Image (cartoon, rainbow, N blue to C red):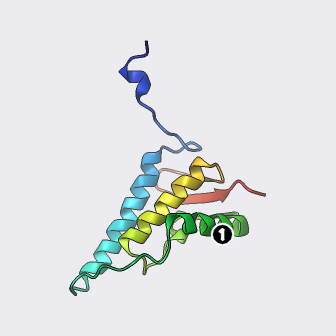
Amino acid sequence: MPGKETEKVKIVIKDMVLDKLLDAFAKLLARAEARGQDNPEPKKIVKDRFTVAEKIVSIRAYAKEHKRFLFEDIYTPDMTKSEMINVFLALLELLKLQTVRVEQAGIFEQISIISNEV
C-alpha cells in the first residue's frame, strides 16, 4: 500500500513550479493593496464585474488572438481583490484544461502565458 509520501503531489508547469505563479499573483495583490492604502476612504462592498467562467472565456479569446502575453496583462489596475482572484482561478482552470501554458525564461523574469490553441 502506498505511503504518505506518494500522496504528496508537486505540480510542475513547463519547467516552472506552481509556487512561482502563486508568488507572482501575491505580488499583484500586494501592489493592489498598496494602492488602496493611499485612499483611506471607508471600504465598500462592490459586486464583481465578471465571474470566473466569464473570465475563462475572456482569457481564452485573448490568448487565441495574442498567442503570447505577460501574466500581468490579464490584470487591470482598477480590479478589486475579488476580481483578481477570479482572474487567477480562471487562469488555473485554463492551465488545467491545457488551453494555455505558462513559461518563465529565468528566475527573476516575468511569466508569459502562451496559447496552446491554433
Amino acid tagged 1: Tyr
For this view, does 18 lie left or right of residue 64? left
For this view, does 68 lie left or right of residue 73? right
Instruction: Name the foreground residue: 106 vs 50.
Output: 50
Which residue was labeled with disc 1? 62
Please tell me whether mark 1 sits on a helix, a strand or a loop: helix
Which residue shows up at 58% across the image and 63% down it?
Answer: 56
For this view, does 10 lie left or right of residue 13? left
> In the orientation shown, which residue stands out farthest toward the right?
118
Q: Would you identify the image quadrant in which residue 8 lies?
A: top left
Q: Is 102 situated above or below 85?
A: above
Is residue 33 visible in the rendered image? The answer is yes
Circle 1 crowding by C-alpha within 10 Å: few under 14, some 14–19, many from 20? some
Is residue 110 visible in the rendered image? The answer is no
Pick the quarter of the image with the C terminus: bottom right
Q: Would you identify the image quadrant in which residue 48 lies?
A: bottom left
Which residue shows up at 43% across the image and 12% down it?
Answer: 1
For this view, does 35 lie left or right of residue 59? left
Q: Is 8 situated above or below 50?
A: above
Q: Is 86 situated above or below 5?
A: below
Instruction: Name the foreground residue: 82 vs 71.
Output: 82
Q: Where is residue 32 in the image (x, y as percent from the top left)?
A: 35, 73
Q: Where is residue 92 in the image (x, y as percent from the top left)?
A: 52, 53
Which residue shows up at 25% across the image and 84% down it?
Answer: 38
Instruction: Name the foreground residue: 64 vs 48.
Output: 48
Q: Would you identify the image quadrant in which residue 65 lies?
A: bottom right
